[in-house]
Amino acid sequence: MAIQVKFFASMRDLIGDDRELDADIVQQQTLITADDVWNYCAQDKLRPANVLIAVNMDYVDGQTEVKDGDEVAFFPPVTGG
Amino acid sequence: MAIQVKFFASMRDLIGDDRELDADIVQQQTLITADDVWNYCAQDKLRPANVLIAVNMDYVDGQTEVKDGDEVAFFPPVTGG
Amino acid sequence: MSVIILAQPFDPWQTLAEYQQKMPHLDGKYGATAVFLGTMRDFNEGNNVSQMFLEHYSGMTEKHLEKICTQATEDYALLETLVIHRVGEINPNDPIVLVAVWSSHRKEAFEACREIMEDLKSRAPFWKKEQLNSGEDRWVEKNTKGY
Amino acid sequence: MSVIILAQPFDPWQTLAEYQQKMPHLDGKYGATAVFLGTMRDFNEGNNVSQMFLEHYSGMTEKHLEKICTQATEDYALLETLVIHRVGEINPNDPIVLVAVWSSHRKEAFEACREIMEDLKSRAPFWKKEQLNSGEDRWVEKNTKGY
């Protein structure tokens, strides 16, 4: 019963490795958003303006609600191809 | 001392094989154009509106002057590729 | 339709030859094949690059590439599509990405191939880290413009 | 830069592999290769086609293809260009035309490849005669639209 949080590329350099957020702590709030997840993990680190967010591998914005069991990812603009 | 005339694809079906126009006959005129070459070869056959003309392998229009030694070609719209 | 994430080098032309041999049901049906191949250069933004590391988000990458190919197949009536993308350590002159589409006519093939590449560039979660000749390394921050 | 008129079938992917091997001076310089391959279909304009004959104006065809490639090389800063076009008898599923360009960036590669194909279609003196399954033959009167 937890939220998986992943960081990729320069976002991992900034925040650190992937982690699991305890859902019990999280559920003290009535609603938890992707922004909240960032704040739990990043503490006082400012979020770069161009960060991208995915919940369960779909792109979302920071206001998106996150539920127990979800996978939330933060990463910089993609540069493949 | 002659003008080479070539016909391609459906234009050869219409007019017939390649030929050499005798420059002496041709030079009875002061100026000979690609249109004149068509008329010499085609006799009374109407020229299809979309025929393309090349003199020495460059695209030209019917008013272009043709000289002894030139190669003149008539062909339909190209359909390669 | 195939989407392949590869951790080792590949030969793009041999791969295409083999892929096409596996689609005999399309013989005589396609008139147009458009292919894009992205290859690692040994320079970028004024610096010499000695090696590159390509990171991806396993699972999300495949999901979005498949979505992109499905969308293009619908929009352009494609008969077949192949996307291959490298991850891991890449050396100059190594193929990075291959996009190939097969359709009846050339207009659709050209447009679909380019659109898949642009969608891949803007939406598929891959990240490049360049190792410079100077010893430094850096994340590539954005792609060059495609249009 | 190569322009090749071929009277016999060719393998496009093997040809590309071999061509690329002959340009080691460009290793690490090109980031983008765009390829278009035109293949004979077994149907056209509602009819089944059993064979095709491709006529060309020897000399003028090469001259104009070289002009088209030279222009594209200038306009798009291409590093290398290859155009191969079949003539003679062609069967369904045979490659007809291959256009390949190599450049630093993808925008230039995509645009140059398409422009060379469109210029070839509108200016290079080739003509297709189709043999229908019904036994009839007919000159193809015009190309499908490219844009």
Image (cartoon, coloured by chain):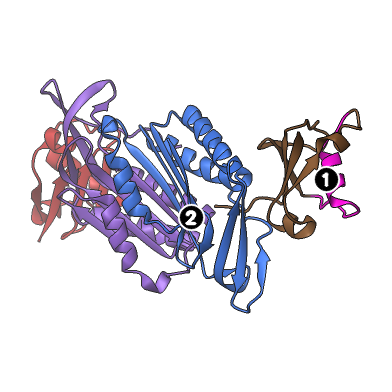
Chain colours: A brown, B red, C blue, D purple
Amino acid type, mark 2: Ala
Q: CA distance from mark 1 to mark 2?
A: 30 Å
Residue marked by disc 2: C7
Q: Percent from the top left, x then y, of residue D7?
A: 15, 50
Number of numbered labels in the structure image: 2
| Chain under numbered label 2 | C
> Residue B64: in sight, yes or no?
no
Residue A55 percent across, percent down from the top left:
71, 36
**Residue C18 showing in the rendered view:** yes
The crowd level at tag 2 (other Cα within 10 Å; few <14, some 14-19, many 20+) is few
Q: Quickly name the residue at label 1.
A: A38
SS assignment at label 1: helix
Asked if the stretch drawn in magenta spans residue D146, the answer is: no
Q: Quadrant of the N terminus of chain A?
A: top right
Across and down, in percent, residue C42 comes to 52, 70
For mark 2, give the secondary structure.
Answer: loop
Q: Chain of mark 1?
A: A
Name the one closer to the observer, D4 or C83: C83
Residue A25 - label: none
Among the 4 quarters of the image, the one containing residue D37: top left
Residue sitting nearer the eye, C80 or D58: C80
Query: Image check: A17 left or right of C57?
Result: right
Left or right, B25 with respect to B10, comes to left
Magenta stretch? A31-49
Name which residue lies at 89% across and 51% down. Answer: A43
Q: Is residue D56 left or right of residue D114?
A: left
